[in-house]
Image (cartoon, rainbow, N blue to C red):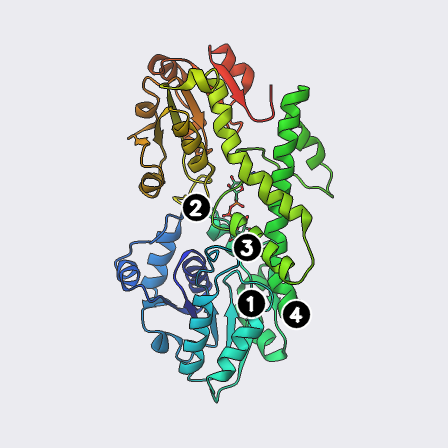
Amino acid sequence: MKIAMVGSGYVGLVSGACFADFGHDVVCIDKDARKIEALHDGVMPIYEPGLDGLVESNVAAGRLSFTTNLAEGIEDAAAIFIAVGTPSRRGDGHADLTFVHEVAREVGENLSSEAVIVTKSTVPVGTGDEVERIIRDTGTPHRFAVVSNPEFLREGAAIGDFKRPDRIVIGAEDEFGQEVMREVYRPLYLNESPILFTSRRTSELIKYAGNAFLATKITFINEMADLCEKVGANVQDVARGIGMDNRIGAKFLNAGPGYGGSCFPKDTLALLKTAEDYDSPTRIVEAVVKTNESRKRAMGRKVLDALGGAEAARGKKAALLGLTFKPNTDDMRDSPSIAIAQTLGDAGVKVSAFDPEGMELAAPLMPEVDMCADPYAAIDSADVVVIVTEWDEFRALDLGRVIELAKQPVLVDLRNIYTPEDVRARGFTYASVGRV
Ligand code: UGA
């Protein structure tokens, strides 16, 4: 089956490479000529574990190719995926659908045979209706259906998530759309991945409701963490204690510095806008967005506390370990590290940092921060060491070396990756999240 993937960003490239690996014939299309050229040379535009190997083997097998030419790329494709960006529109937080609409028009104008057009981009409820209208207005003589098929993959674990999903959601309004999508996902169906067919609008909302629920879960445990610190309880045990209840579930209950990334912040805001437009307020999500936003700077203040308060902190040095919003990605979007570095900088603290993958993208976002070649260079003569992102290599730091290099043995662990008793026994003053 031939599949065209319009947009070779995160979702498009991972999905395209995985579909090719299932045996489909996939063309990834992007109007960014430099990106396509780099892909031809085997250079990935993003850091995602395993992606380069997957792309290489499927290109070699002749199942995956790249082009900037949309008309050529979609020719004879049975399914044409739209996987372009839907960033927050400047000013109001609505999802910006400019790219989605542009692609819809171009697809309609260039259809060469019947096809199902699938929105994989995260799009607000009703976008499928608009895409259908745009394609119809191009006057194409070919039969087409517009289907919603949201993506639930996580950065850093994207290939595994795509190949072994908890579920596949397909919002299709007619038999033609359902049939083609069944064929697209047949390899996964054989793996017994459940496929949920819904209406198109329902499918569009499932994506936002899912992300908003996960963001709520994280924010809930973060507030419990603050309470734990006040009452002398341990948030990891609280998470375990509630997570063992199957109705709650153990995942996404790790307290930390607040969620970031390209999805939760943008999608929760977009959901609020939809709710407002339909006069159906979602107060819980409103509270989640506000609480998470203020948490990031609060984490900066937590570091100031560890330095003896804002006054005492002036002129001291903080070493940030990890800058990306989570490990195994170079993505810096809405990362808590940005607000933390700003809060520290505002208080006159000098900041050094190390991140295994994120420093190139981080540097322009935090120009005052001294980017270092390894964790120990960042720690050198620091008054406080702060674990911001739980990269594996920070889980087993040489603590003896840290004590030698740092000016003060103070560790602020915003991801709870160390055991308080252990590090205190090594001579550290230690603060973490939701544990005393
Ligand atoms: C998220 C969803 O998990 C995916 O299902 C979804 O497909 C994706 O958004 C999307 O809409 O494209 P992602 O943003 O890659 O995926 O990352 P997550 O692993 O969900 O982490 C998001 C943020 O929550 C990170 O900042 C992470 O540190 C934080 N988090 C996560 C916590 O603070 N605690 C947790 O227990 C889990």
Query: Which quadrant of the structure image shows residue 105?
Result: bottom left
Mark 3 or mark 2: whose residue is earlier in sequence: 3
The picture places residue 336, in percent across and down from the top left corner, at: 47, 37
- Is 209 left or right of 64, judged from the image as shown? right
Q: Earlier in the sequence, mark 3 or mark 4?
A: 3
Q: Residue at x 39, y 17 (%)?
A: 383
Q: Amino acid at mark 2?
A: Arg
Mark 2 and 4 residues: CB-CB less than 8 Å, in contact?
A: no
Q: Which mark is residue 411?
A: none
The disc labelled 3 sits on which kind of residue? Phe
Cα–Cα span, label 4 and label 1: 20 Å
Q: Which residue is mark 4?
A: 199
| Comparing labels 2 and 4, the label whose residue is closer to the camera | 2
Q: Nearer the viewer, residue 125 or 60?
A: 125
Whichever of callouts 2 and 1 sits on the residue coming sooner in the sequence is 1
Q: CA distance from mark 3 to mark 4?
A: 18 Å
- Label 2 lies in ligand 1 vicinity (Cβ under 8 Å): no
Which residue position holds label 3?
A: 152
CA separation in Å, label 2 and label 4: 32 Å
Q: Which residue is mark 2?
A: 333
Amino acid on which disc 4 is placed: Ser
Numbered disc in front, either 2 or 1? 2
Q: Name the disc covering residue 186, or none.
A: 1
